[in-house]
Image (spheres, grey):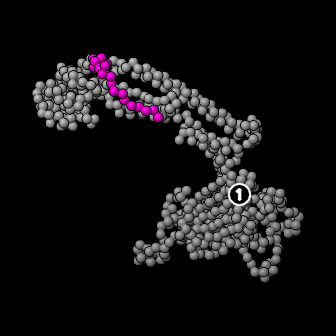
Amino acid sequence: MAAGACWPAWQPGTNPGNDRLSVILERLTDAEKSLNHHSAFIQSVLAETRSMLTELRAAGPPANIASQHIVEIKADNDQPLASLDIYVVSGDTANADSVRADQRAALEESAADIAALLGLTSQEIVRAYDLFNQADADASGKLDTHELKPALEALCGTVIPEEDFGIILQEFDKNHDGHLNFEEFLFCYCHTPQKKIHHLETWVHKKEDRLPSDFRATVVGVRTSSITTYLRSELEQMQACLALPAVFVLFLLFMLSMELHQGNSVIQGMEHAFKSDIEGNANFAFAGVVPFENGRMGHKNIYDVNSFADFWSWFDMGLATLLFPESWDVSEPRVNAGARCTAPVDALLGAGWTFNASVLNQVGSASLDLGPLCDDLGPDPAYPKDFFRKPPYLFFNSIVGGLRLSQEQVPLKECQDTDLHLRVYDSKCLEDPGYWIEPDRDRSLIMTKSKVNKPNASTHYFLSQWTQAEVRKQVKALENSAWLNQRTGKVEILFTTYNAHQHIFTALYVYFFVNRGGHIHKFIKPMSVWVDPYQSVWSYVVDSVFALMVLKLF
């Protein structure tokens, strides 16, 4: 596809972020090529194995095969690895003598150990094997009820009633296949009246009534279902190992997609700026007689709010000044001079107080002690109106709508000791809202609707177009109405900003939790989100590759 057909051609070096993405995608391509190479190698090995098995079937089973069965792996050349069909082909009776000879030689080597386990002699073990093979006319490695009778009678040297053989088969058929293999035949012989006592004396401390696994695999043989299960497990594990490179590639694609969509560095930078501003610049307890003097230094911040009076001071002098700017910030000397040239009545009006018109006429607009010098100070510098219609928040952000102030109120309850309560406390009791330790921040973001907007504790909004005087007037009205009181459990302040430069909305939550001990917990939680999660064409590319990898794997 020609460059620019779907999206503009990319030029190396034009953007450091694009260079980094290009390197990552090249590595992903190399990993996929390596995966295809290893897969082709395994397919070639599998094809060679099929060819060897075909030749083996044509030549007949070799003489050193311990079992009476040959496990065959059947698969078409174009059949996927995970769908191999495993089944069993019966042994060839023509080669039974050579197979039995090998098995007998192995049995003679281990006969002494097996005899010690069963309470028999080595000669009895070998003789039992010979009689078992004589009865096994079809070389199947198992005896049915008709084959079992002559073998067991010859081994025991006594006649056994016909009706007892069905019971014997049911009792000693450990794998429930309707036949007795050589191991089960030995246990049947050990439980005859002549051998039962010796067998119990040696077997009483064993945890299971099975012979060692190497004996069963060498002489008795391995169940075809066990071989099938083992081979399927091996094939599944091999397939899982082959999928590991693709899984790693999928994980890398996921991480890259998250980085492209969320832009964590930008989001964290935005949230850090807002939180730092509230923590460091929303101050109160100023040095100076505010509002008649400029507050030169605020000695307390949000984490020093320990009473309702502290909250109103912080909201009035700190938060309102940050979120409702009215002019472009100037240096400290100019602010101090401006405060000296502000009439007391104007300072009070700016702080949110209201007066009757008759009072204002009597006081007038007399300034402080600088007199006519104030007329020569000149105007304050104007903010750059090419960018904003009004001063921004933190230079680059505008507040959307305004600020919301709400609280949860704690319900009343009966006091535990009415007599003591009337004598000592003489007030109403409240339920315990918790908050004895600092609350969990994620769970605290949810306000309980049943506790919000109660009488004398309704939610209030401070519009973004209000002046600081209007904001402070509303704050004073809330303070006068005792909006915060003993029933207050949690206070939430929420305002939303929009950054047009990054196309990001940020909701900043400020919480105050009041426990029944009188302590106030505080924390700030900014939450930012991109308006458009697809910031570049690379987001589409990475998401498309990720989706294809998911479809390929699953």
Residue 452 visible to an observer of this rendering: yes
Q: Quadrant of the N terminus?
A: top right
| Residue 93 sits inside the magenta stretch | yes
Which secondary structure lies at badge 1? Answer: strand
Residue 113 visible to an observer of this rendering: no
Residue 49 higher or lower than 179, as above or below? above
Residue under the point 66% across and 33% down? 26
Quarter of the figure with residue 14: top right
Residue 34 higher or lower than 395, as above or below? above
Residue under the point 68% across and 72% down? 474
Q: Which residue is mark 1?
A: 498
The image shows residue 511 at horizontal and vertical percentages of 59, 61
Residue kind at label 1, given as amino acid type: Tyr
Residue under the point 66% across and 56% down? 506
| Residue 329 sits inside the magenta stretch | no
The image shows residue 366 at horizontal and vertical percentages of 82, 73
